[in-house]
């Protein structure tokens, strides 16, 4: 069978058509090394008590193994006011350290990418400059682990620079309390925290 159409070779037709058909530019990437910074609003609820709101921020580093899976570490810090009347006054701070994986619903031809993620989390709450019954008290910290799930959306300005909006929830326990130089371990204090982050992500 002839490989020509009206005397024109097929490969020549393909080459001509490709020359006049613009390629689709890649709008987003999730592969390789990534850096992110964000502002954050968060909350903490301990053992069915009141919900306490906090404000802060954090950073994220990650590596996209492929278009779908990115492994990451995230470090967040926030400061908040405690509503409980029987809680000591002072400077209350909360920190999260997450190590996990993000799963993208990625399409490189789109400028937006939704995702889900899961992580193991270390969480700490510290109270410094504490006052109890008008008496200065030792610094206190509550420490424990949690499991975090979340999701969000990245909207790309360029192929390697995006707005990143994320909502995450962490459930776990405080298992250790340090009061000054005294540590109390083997505790079981339920604690839930949530974080809403708005920031930027960059693939250098």
Image (cartoon, rainbow, N blue to C red):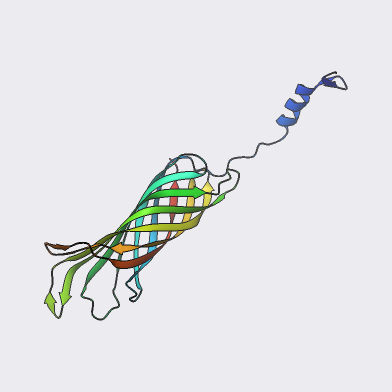
Q: Is residue 69 left or right of residue 174?
A: right
Q: Is residue 140 left or right of residue 118?
A: left
Image position of 130 with respect to 157: above or below:
below
Tell me which corner region of the image, top left, top right, bottom left or bottom right, holds residue 143.
bottom left
Q: Residue at x 23, y 80 (%)?
A: 86
Q: Nearer the viewer, residue 110 or 138?
A: 138
Q: Pinpoint residue 85: horizontal percent, then vertical percent.
A: 26, 81
Q: Quadrant of the C terminus?
A: top left
Taking 4 as reference, is 119 above or below it?
A: below
The answer to whether 121 is drawn above or below residue 184 in the figure is above
Q: Nearer the viewer, residue 127 or 181?
A: 181
Horizontally, residue 175 falls left or right of residue 37, namely left
Q: Whole-percent x and y of residue 154?
A: 51, 53
Q: Of 152 and 13, which appears nearest the observer?
A: 152
- Across and down, in percent, residue 94 comes to 29, 63
Count numbered badges in the picture. 0
In which quarter of the view is residue 131 placed? Answer: bottom left
Residue at coordinates 51% horizontally, 44% vertically from top-left? 68
The residue sitting at 28% across, 60% down in the picture is: 144
Image quadrant in which the N terminus is located: top right
Percent of width and height locating residue 37: 38, 52
In terms of depth relative to the viewer, which is nearer, 197 or 142? 142
């Amino acid at each position: 069978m002839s490989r020509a159409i009206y005397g024109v070779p097929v490969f020549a037709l393909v080459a001509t058509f490709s020359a006049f058909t613009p390629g689709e530019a890649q709008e987003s990437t999730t592969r390789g090394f990534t850096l992110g910074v964000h502002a954050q609003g968060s909350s903490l609820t301990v053992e069915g008590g009141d919900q306490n709101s906090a404000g802060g921020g954090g950073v994220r580093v990650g590596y996209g193994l492929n278009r779908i899976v990115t492994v990451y570490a995230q470090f967040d810090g926030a400061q908040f006011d405690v509503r409980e009347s029987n809680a000591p006054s002072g400077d209350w701070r909360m920190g999260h350290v997450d190590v996990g994986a993000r799963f993208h619903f990625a399409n490189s031809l789109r400028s937006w990418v939704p995702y889900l993620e899961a992580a193991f989390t270390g969480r700490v709450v510290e109270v410094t400059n504490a006052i109890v019954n008008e008496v200065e008290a030792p610094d206190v910290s509550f420490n424990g682990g949690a499991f975090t799930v979340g999701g969000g959306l990245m909207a790309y300005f360029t192929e390697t620079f995006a707005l990143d909006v994320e909502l995450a929830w962490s459930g776990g326990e405080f298992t250790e309390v340090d009061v000054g130089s005294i540590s109390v371990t083997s505790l079981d204090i339920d604690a839930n925290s949530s974080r809403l982050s708005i920031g930027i992500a960059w693939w250098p």
